[in-house]
Image (spheres, rainbow, N blue to C red):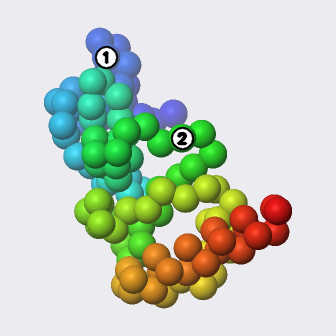
Protein backbone atom coordinates (compact mmCIF):
# COMPACT_ATOMS: atom_id res chain seq x y z
CA UNK A 1 0.00 0.00 0.00
CA UNK A 2 1.39 3.37 -0.95
CA UNK A 3 4.38 1.93 -2.87
CA UNK A 4 4.75 2.56 -6.57
CA UNK A 5 5.36 -0.64 -8.53
CA UNK A 6 6.14 -0.45 -12.22
CA UNK A 7 3.89 -2.73 -14.26
CA UNK A 8 6.64 -3.25 -16.83
CA UNK A 9 9.24 -4.71 -14.44
CA UNK A 10 7.17 -5.29 -11.28
CA UNK A 11 10.06 -3.90 -9.22
CA UNK A 12 9.80 -0.99 -6.83
CA UNK A 13 10.78 2.31 -8.35
CA UNK A 14 14.55 2.77 -8.23
CA UNK A 15 15.25 -0.93 -7.53
CA UNK A 16 17.95 -2.51 -9.67
CA UNK A 17 17.34 -6.19 -10.40
CA UNK A 18 20.27 -8.51 -9.53
CA UNK A 19 20.62 -9.70 -13.13
CA UNK A 20 21.82 -6.22 -14.08
CA UNK A 21 25.10 -6.59 -12.19
CA UNK A 22 27.96 -7.77 -14.44
CA UNK A 23 30.10 -10.83 -13.77
CA UNK A 24 32.91 -10.06 -11.33
CA UNK A 25 30.88 -7.40 -9.53
CA UNK A 26 31.74 -7.33 -5.80
CA UNK A 27 29.21 -6.12 -3.20
CA UNK A 28 29.08 -5.92 0.60
CA UNK A 29 26.38 -8.07 2.22
CA UNK A 30 24.43 -6.97 5.29
CA UNK A 31 26.35 -9.47 7.47
CA UNK A 32 29.73 -7.90 6.63
CA UNK A 33 30.93 -10.47 4.08
CA UNK A 34 31.63 -9.57 0.48
CA UNK A 35 29.91 -11.39 -2.36
CA UNK A 36 30.99 -11.65 -5.99
CA UNK A 37 28.97 -12.53 -9.08
CA UNK A 38 30.49 -15.43 -11.04
CA UNK A 39 28.74 -17.19 -13.93
CA UNK A 40 25.37 -15.66 -13.00
CA UNK A 41 25.59 -16.80 -9.32
CA UNK A 42 26.55 -14.87 -6.20
CA UNK A 43 29.29 -16.46 -4.05
CA UNK A 44 30.96 -15.15 -0.94
CA UNK A 45 34.23 -13.57 -2.04
CA UNK A 46 36.22 -15.62 0.48
CA UNK A 47 34.77 -18.85 -0.94
CA UNK A 48 35.62 -17.73 -4.48
CA UNK A 49 39.23 -16.95 -3.50
CA UNK A 50 39.62 -20.26 -1.63
CA UNK A 51 38.15 -22.42 -4.40
CA UNK A 52 40.18 -20.61 -7.06
CA UNK A 53 43.42 -21.65 -5.30
CA UNK A 54 42.49 -24.86 -3.43
CA UNK A 55 39.49 -26.43 -5.14
CA UNK A 56 35.98 -27.03 -3.77
CA UNK A 57 35.18 -26.80 -0.07
CA UNK A 58 34.33 -30.29 1.27
CA UNK A 59 30.93 -31.08 2.81
CA UNK A 60 30.84 -30.21 6.53
CA UNK A 61 33.63 -27.63 6.30
CA UNK A 62 33.58 -23.84 6.32
CA UNK A 63 36.04 -20.98 5.92
CA UNK A 64 37.00 -18.73 8.79
CA UNK A 65 38.82 -15.40 8.75
CA UNK A 66 41.76 -15.76 11.13
CA UNK A 67 41.99 -12.05 11.94
CA UNK A 68 38.23 -11.73 12.54
CA UNK A 69 37.85 -9.22 9.70
CA UNK A 70 35.16 -10.51 7.30
CA UNK A 71 36.37 -8.12 4.61
CA UNK A 72 39.96 -9.45 4.61
CA UNK A 73 39.76 -12.21 2.00
CA UNK A 74 43.51 -12.71 1.57
CA UNK A 75 44.29 -16.39 1.15
CA UNK A 76 46.70 -16.24 4.12
CA UNK A 77 43.82 -15.05 6.33
CA UNK A 78 41.44 -17.87 5.35
CA UNK A 79 41.40 -21.29 6.98
CA UNK A 80 39.24 -24.29 6.16
CA UNK A 81 37.81 -25.97 9.28
CA UNK A 82 35.12 -28.45 10.17
CA UNK A 83 31.88 -26.88 11.36
CA UNK A 84 32.34 -28.50 14.79
CA UNK A 85 35.50 -26.43 15.38
CA UNK A 86 33.76 -23.07 15.00
CA UNK A 87 31.83 -22.78 18.30
CA UNK A 88 34.76 -23.98 20.42
CA UNK A 89 37.46 -21.88 18.77
CA UNK A 90 35.38 -18.70 18.35
CA UNK A 91 35.30 -18.01 22.10
CA UNK A 92 39.10 -18.34 22.38
CA UNK A 93 40.10 -16.30 19.34
CA UNK A 94 41.62 -12.83 19.61
CA UNK A 95 40.76 -10.18 17.03
CA UNK A 96 43.61 -9.17 14.68
CA UNK A 97 45.99 -11.93 15.81
CA UNK A 98 46.29 -14.35 12.90
CA UNK A 99 49.12 -16.53 14.30
CA UNK A 100 47.46 -16.98 17.68
CA UNK A 101 44.07 -17.75 16.15
CA UNK A 102 45.62 -20.24 13.74
CA UNK A 103 47.21 -22.01 16.72
CA UNK A 104 43.91 -22.00 18.65
CA UNK A 105 42.07 -23.61 15.73
CA UNK A 106 44.81 -26.26 15.45
CA UNK A 107 44.58 -27.03 19.17
CA UNK A 108 40.79 -27.38 18.99
CA UNK A 109 41.12 -29.72 15.99
CA UNK A 110 43.65 -31.87 17.87
CA UNK A 111 41.44 -31.96 20.99
CA UNK A 112 38.49 -33.13 18.88
CA UNK A 113 40.59 -35.86 17.21
CA UNK A 114 41.77 -37.12 20.59
CA UNK A 115 38.18 -37.28 21.94
CA UNK A 116 37.03 -39.26 18.90
CA UNK A 117 39.66 -41.99 19.35
Q: Please rate how many residues cluster around mark 2, counting C-alpha atoms within 10 Å: few if below 14, some from 14 to 19, many from 20.
A: few
Q: Residue at x 60, y 39 (%)?
A: 59
Q: Position of residue 64 (x, y in %)?
A: 47, 63
Contact between marks 1 and 2 (CB within 8 A): the answer is: no
Residue placed furthest toward the front: 117
Number of numbered discs visible in the structure rendering: 2
User: Where is 22 relative to 108, above or below?
Assistant: above
Point 81% across, 68% down: residue: 115
Say whether residue 75 is visible: yes
Q: Would you say residue 17 is visible in this rendering?
A: no
List the single residue furthest toward the top: 8
Provide the secondary structure element on which disc 2 rests: loop
Residue drawn at (51%, 33%) of the image = 1
Q: Quadrant of the C terminus?
A: bottom right
On screen, residue 18 above or below 54: above
Above or below for 88 versus 11: below
Residues 12 and 49: in front is 49
Q: Quick check: 38 left or right of 55?
A: left
Q: Which of 100/12 is in front?
A: 100
Q: Marks 1/2: CA distance?
A: 39 Å
Task: Give percent across and percent down for residue 36.
Answer: 28, 42
Q: Is residue 60 left or right of residue 55?
A: right
Helix, strand or loop for disc 1: loop
x, y percentage for residue 80? 48, 57
**Residue at x 38%, y 80% (from the top left corner):** 98
The first of marks 1 and 2 along the sequence is 1
> Residue beneath label 1, please?
9
Choose top left, top right, bottom left or bottom right for residue 75. Answer: bottom left
Please give the residue where the numbered disc 2 appears in the rendered image.
Answer: 58
Category of crowding for the residue at label 1, using alpha-carbon neighbours closer than 10 angstroms: few (below 14), some (14–19), many (at least 20): few
Amino acid sequence: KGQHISRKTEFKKGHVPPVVYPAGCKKLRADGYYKIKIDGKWLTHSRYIWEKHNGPIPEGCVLIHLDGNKGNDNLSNLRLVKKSVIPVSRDKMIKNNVEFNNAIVSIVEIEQKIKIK
